[in-house]
Image: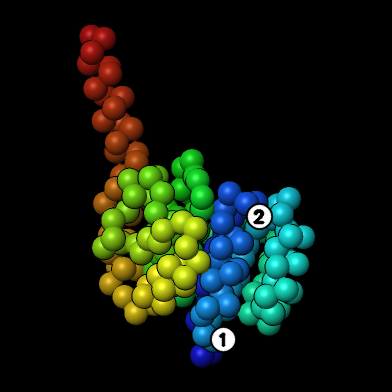
Amino acid sequence: EKSILIGTNCSLQHRKGIDLLLQSMVLLPSHYKLFIVGEGADRLHYENMIAELGLKKRVYLAGAKKEAYRYLPYYDIYVLPSRSEGFPLSLLEAAAYGKQVVCSNIPVFKETFTEKEAIMFELPQVDDLAKAILESYEKKDLGRNIKSKFDAEYSPQCMYDKHIQIYNCRTHLFL
C-alpha cells in the first residue's frame, strides 16, 4: 500500500543494466520495491547480488511471463537502465500506459523521448539512477507527457498511417 513499485520487463543479461538497478535499490528508501519480469543467462548472478545487497524483501524476480506488458499497470515507475538497445519495445509499452519512465541516456532512448517525457541518467552512475528514480516519482506530468508522445507518434494507428503514407509515396514513384 505504501510501497512504490519500480518495474522492468527485460531479459536478464548484462546489457540490460539490471546490476545497476539492483545497486541503486540500496540507495533508495526501503519502501521502494522492484519487480522484474524476465529470464536470462544472468539470473543466478542477479539472485546472488540480491542476497549480497540485502534486498531479498525488496526485489522479486518473476521470471519469464507471456505478455509481460500486462504487469505495467501495477508499476509506479518503469525503469530501463540498458547499456545498449535495438528497438525499445518495452519502453514504448510503458509509454502506452503513461508510466513514469527512467532510462539510461543512450542514443536510442534520446531519439525516442525527451526530458519532458522520461528522466534519463548517465551510465554507469548508480547514484544518478537512484536520484532519477526519486525525481521521476515526484514529476507526475512525465506519465501524461510520455502517453501523449506515444499517442502522437507510436500508437498502432499512427504507425499504420505512416506505413500507408510510405507505401503511397513509393507507389506514385513507379507510376
The quadrant holding residue 96 is bottom left
Q: Is residue 154 above or below residue 7?
A: above
Q: Quick one: 154 or 3, which is closer to the camera?
A: 3
Is the residue under label 1 in contact with that under label 2 (CB below 8 Å)? no
Q: Quick one: 137 or 123, which is closer to the camera?
A: 123
Residue at which label 2 appears: 12
Q: Is residue 29 above or below residue 70?
A: below
Residue at the spot 74% in from the left edge and 66% down from the top edge: 47
- Secondary structure, mark 2, is loop
Label 1 environment density (alpha carbons within 10 Å; few <14, some 14–19, many ≥20): few
Can residue 96 be seen here? The reply is: no
Q: Quick one: 68 or 86, which is closer to the camera?
A: 86
Q: Position of residue 67 (x, y in %)?
A: 59, 56
Residue at the spot 33% in from the left edge and 46% down from the top edge: 111
Q: Position of residue 30 (x, y in %)?
A: 56, 86
Q: Quadrant of the C terminus?
A: top left
Q: Quick one: 77 or 172, which is closer to the camera?
A: 77
